[in-house]
Amino acid sequence: MPDRVICGVARARVGTAWGRRFAAIGIAVAITATLAGCFPAAKDSTAQVTHSPSPQATAPASASPTPRPSASTADPANPQPATPEPVNTPVPKPELIPVPEGTVVAEGDVASPKGSIYFHYRMISNGDNTYSAQYSGFTSTVPVPVSVTLIDVPPEVGDGLTYHGIGDHQLGGPTTTAAPASSVSLGSEGQPSYLGTLVTYSSASSGDGVPIELGPNKILAVDTVRWDIPARQSNVQPADDGPRAYAAGEVTASTASGAPKQYLVAPGDITSVVADRFGVSIEGLIWLNAGLEVFGNQQYLYEGTTLNLDPDSL
């Protein structure tokens, strides 16, 4: 049978067992040699085998790409500060512009009914929402020390003074010439115009040896004080936007300019809604009403309470 060559390997018939054995060995050697001839040897140790490109797998259209970490990705192992919660724009602190320092807001002369006491007074602004009383030209012929004070309800000459009012101040005793000028603060009174009466009274330490009408706390003169205090400006300016649920009360008084001055709390009124009705902050409403009392988590106002809405009345 003729010989055939497959990939450089000679195939021959082998008849005998020994022949077949030697033939098998020869075939193994031939195959090894042939394989070495079928695959090219690498030219050097750094050569790389180049593979032909293969088709890439295409993800379905609906598949989402696998997320990859980035600088903004939250990392539990690297905690970041919490983002601060949004805050409202700061509301300016309620403010009342004082009457300029030195402004005279009331002035007059006092003379007792019998003419034994005389002096001049002036009420002036201290420039910080407080006021002082200044006294000058004091003369007296009564044999006891004399004092003055401001109160709201006028008494009668000859009555006994039971309340020493605001700005209680001793002017002095009997004089032969006018006493030096003196002054006294009216304390924290920001709007003293309600103090419409200046009372002159005896400040004798005892009634012994003096007429009854000159005894301790006997009223010697009563004078009406006519205040002329300029309106003060404020950054809290209430304006009524009309009744609504939870702020259904009535405006019971207005200022000379027509702004709401007083508000009567209705049942169910809530602090925040009342403040919103009048266009002021809750802080502003509390500033207008020192000591304002509320109840419940919603801060309900007490029915029948009258709220102040006029900054100039503070």
Image: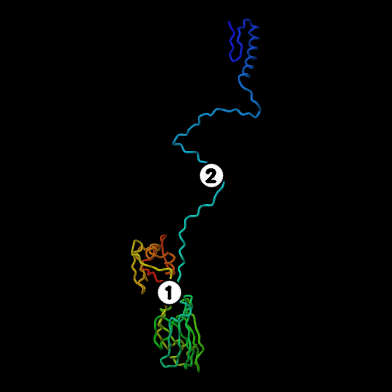
Q: Is residue 35 left or right of residue 268?
A: right
Q: Secondary structure at mark 2?
A: loop
Which of the two labelled residues, at mark 2 and mark 1, occupies the earlier sequence position? 2
Vertical arrangement, residue 260 with respect to residue 204, above or below = above
Q: How many marks?
A: 2
The residue indicated by pointer 1 is: 232
The residue indicated by pointer 2 is: 70
Residue 198: where, in percent of width, then height?
Answer: 43, 84
Residue 17: where, in percent of width, then height?
Answer: 64, 6
Quarter holding the N terminus is top right
How many neighbours does mark 2 have within 10 angstroms: few (below 14), some (14-19), or many (20 or more)?
Answer: few
25 or 92, nearer to the observer: 25
Picture quadrant of residue 258:
bottom left
Image point (47%, 62%), residue name: 90
**In the rendering, which numbered label is found on residue 254?**
none
Q: Amino acid at mark 2?
A: Ser
Residue 188: where, in percent of width, then height?
Answer: 47, 76
Q: Is residue 220 left or right of residue 49?
A: left
